[in-house]
Image (spheres, rainbow, N blue to C red):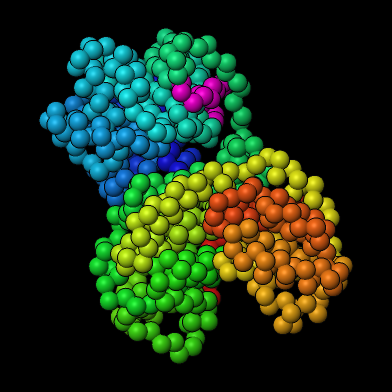
Amino acid sequence: MCGIVGYLGEKNIKEILLNGLKELEYRGYDSAGIAVLNNGNFSLFKAVGKLINLEEKTKEFSTEGFSIGIGHTRWATHGKPTELNAHPHIAEESYVVHNGIIENYAQIKKELENDGVKFLSQTDTEVIVHLFEKNLHTLKDPFKAFEKTINTIEGAYAILLVTKSKDDTIFFAKNGSPLLIGTEGDDKFFASSDTPIIGLAKEVYYFDDGEYGYVNKESIKIFDKDGNEKTPTFKELSTNKLSAQKDGYRFFMEKEIYEQTTVIADTLLGRVTDKEIIFDELDPSLFDGINEIKLCACGTSYHAALSASYLFERYAKIKTSVEIASELRYRDAILTPDTLFVVISQSGETADTLETLKMAKKAGLKSLAICNVDNSSMVRLADSTILTRAGVEKGVASTKAFATQVSVFWMLSLYLAQQRSTLSLEEIQEQITLLREVPKVVKVDETLHERIKRLSKRYLHGHGFFFIGRDIFFPLALEGALKLKEISYLHAEGYPAGEMKHGPIALADPELFTIALLPEHLLFDKTKSNIEELSARDSTICVVSSQNFDKADDFIHINQQKHYMLEFFEMMVALQLLSLEISIRLGNDVDMPRNLAKSVTVE
């Protein structure tokens, strides 16, 4: 969820770059920086934390006349959030900013180090600028050097590069990560989304994958992936910043459901290799002497914790318990030193969860925070932290925060399995292959969305909803019910499917809507039998599955997957979309549901 800005012209470049980065704050970041080339001299400023720290460093900085500059907000993937790891990255006479990941960076870095290059950071990005300068030394032509660099690197990227050898030019390249250019007269503006340049540029061009080129005062040169020059077709730029932040979606919640493919990919970056799970932010000794994991959270994060309990016990073979924070605070819980206390929170400020962390610290337990906000209260208090990299979530009803939390827990369960040797190397590699498929699985299928949109009109009345599932699909059922309650104000409950006959089935009638999660690869026959019990009592049933079910009144068909966790993530998207479309049909404010706050900082 990093952000990029760039500018070429004679206006106040510091103000343009810093204001542009401010407009990207909603995406989330842990460090920021700008580099300006003016009158043949570079000025570089970088800071960890919020942009106010970068503003303070640039307080005395100013330029006159024509300048070129690039800026970046970084969310750590390779390397910790430090000034050295913040962008822009530098070589002798060139600077670069980059979003995405360079998949072959390790090989390139090794070759460059063999050539005597000294690296300052732990990032994959730094190889770009050093490789460019190596090519420049050989080819003597900045554009040819940049072109060769782009042809060498592999992966996803949006790149801006500036060099003293061509001090009136910004080089750019785009592949799999958003990048655009806006114009106003001779001024040229780059950004990773519309918002930084609204009010500055009148027209905008959105680069396609594989496009690269350069921009100077006189011209814009764009080439496709085959090296053929293209003539760009500019569009008029919107003047509505809020609308631009929504990227054309009706609500932020809808946008955030669609963003899950990107943020999960961000969550995996630097943590998933071909053979193992790596958490550079964790000291392996954190788990020494640990015989139990206690997960503590509220709301959606509690459902993510429940999901984690199945993964920890199944893969890492470690005893795991899950606590509702508001309950743990006021009972005489037994907290023993051989327990790792894990708190989960989107904001890191959830009052009840924060208080339980203080209790655990007082009791002498080791602690770990799973959080989306760096430098939040929980992050500062916990012994260790794993950031979920979901970016800012504006919709009150959490979607991508839940998705990234479960992704982190799946990785963490495998990380522990590695440490405890509870899975073989082959089993770990199989799980890693599955993990890498999650971003593709959660990418919203437009046909599925349209089907759910049409289906939603049948679920606007009745006396309530049951969401049912078994095993790890029970917490997903709880989360589906919570999403519906939060934004539609309809009564919904999540239940383990096997519990229906122990009381709840008394409510079954045609006005009770049952949303049944029926995975092919986990307890299929058992769950199917539970659904049939409800069908026999004339409950209206909507089945979410890849397998046909002849007793369903409605059916949300997901793709056939090779593993239950991939079914979990695709069903998650289906439930989010169902709640969204029901709420929209009821005329509710999806992003700001009544009585709710995004971060619950009071008891």
Q: Is residue 588 magenta?
A: no
Residue 172, how many percent across, how many down? 39, 23
Q: What residue is rendered at 56% in x and 58% in y?
A: 564
Region rendered in magenta: 198-211
Is residue 434 toward the left or the right of residue 55 in the image? right
In this view, 498 is above or below 175:
below
Q: At x 33% / y 53%, what residue is drawn?
A: 276
Identity of the residue furthest to the left in this view: 116
**Residue placed most toward the observer, 368 or 537:** 537
Quadrant in which the N terminus is drawn: top left
Most common SS among magenta residues: loop
**In the rendered view, would you say 81 is above or below 147?**
below
Q: Which residue is nearer to you in this view: 516 or 602?
A: 516
- Residue 571 visible in the current orientation: yes
Give how far across and how far down residue 555 sits, in percent. Answer: 76, 54
Left or right? Give the position of 74 relative to 477.
Answer: left
Residue occupying image coordinates x 51% and y 34%? 193
- Residue for point 29% across, 47% down: 79
